[in-house]
Image (spheres, rainbow, N blue to C red):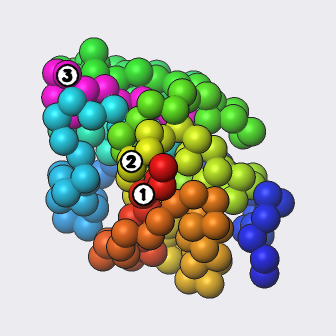
Amino acid sequence: MPVNAQREFPMPHVCPWWFAYTFDHRLRLYVHNPERILGPYVKPGMTAIDLGCGMGYFSIPLARMVGDSGKVLAVDIQQKMLDVLMKRAQKAGVGERLRPVLCDSANLCVEPQSDFALAFFMIHEAPAPARYIEQVYGSLKPGARFLFVEPKWHVPREQFDQLVAHAQKNGFSLEGRPRIAISHAALLARRN
């Protein structure tokens, strides 16, 4: 199946805000520990984007990692997710480092100034995943990294590999395939 800007996954799906509480369970730390997964890529002072941030499972740890001089753009299509995220971020003491960004299905709404982008278990929800990856490219500085992770039960390996190949044809280089439990993962870097 060729990768293009048309729908690449069989069913459109956006996780309802209330279901996101199930993703933030403490037991998930044993499978997807944000500090362990993101630590090699995120440093103090960076600007990071959490695409499809939900209620902040990765955004809040990212905000800790970028420190007082960094910032996190928490991007989601649902205002309710962003509202809950900001309450959690304030409670965690990192609210001033987070900027909620309400996007729509066609536009990420972020400027091209970021050092790192994360899309964890969410590109399969985009109506046009290939076009979405092109927008991620446009949001990054030259040399910035993009960690792209999809669940094995939603995205077959062949489709994931096609999206990685599409990213490579559109300005990304493949730096590696990190091992992340129950996931397909690719670490991409924006070429100049």
Q: Quadrant of the N terminus?
A: bottom right
Which residues are drawn in magenta?
Answer: 66-76
Q: Residue at x 58, y 41 (%)?
A: 138
Q: Residue furthest top?
A: 96
x and y percentages locating residue 39 in the rendered image: 18, 53
The residue lying toward the viewer, choosing from 100 and 88, is 100
Label 3 vs label 2, nearer the camera = 2
x and y percentages locating residue 157 in the rendered image: 56, 83
**Disc number at residue 189?**
1
Q: Residue at x 46, y 23 (%)?
A: 100
User: Circle 3 is placed at which residue position?
Assistant: 69
**Disc number at residue 144?**
2
Say if mark 1 contacts mark 2, CB within 8 Å. yes
Q: What secondary structure is marked by label 1?
A: strand
* Mark 1 or 2, nearer chain start: 2
Q: Quadrant of residue 78?
A: top right
Task: Please give the count of numbered marks on the rendered protein.
Answer: 3
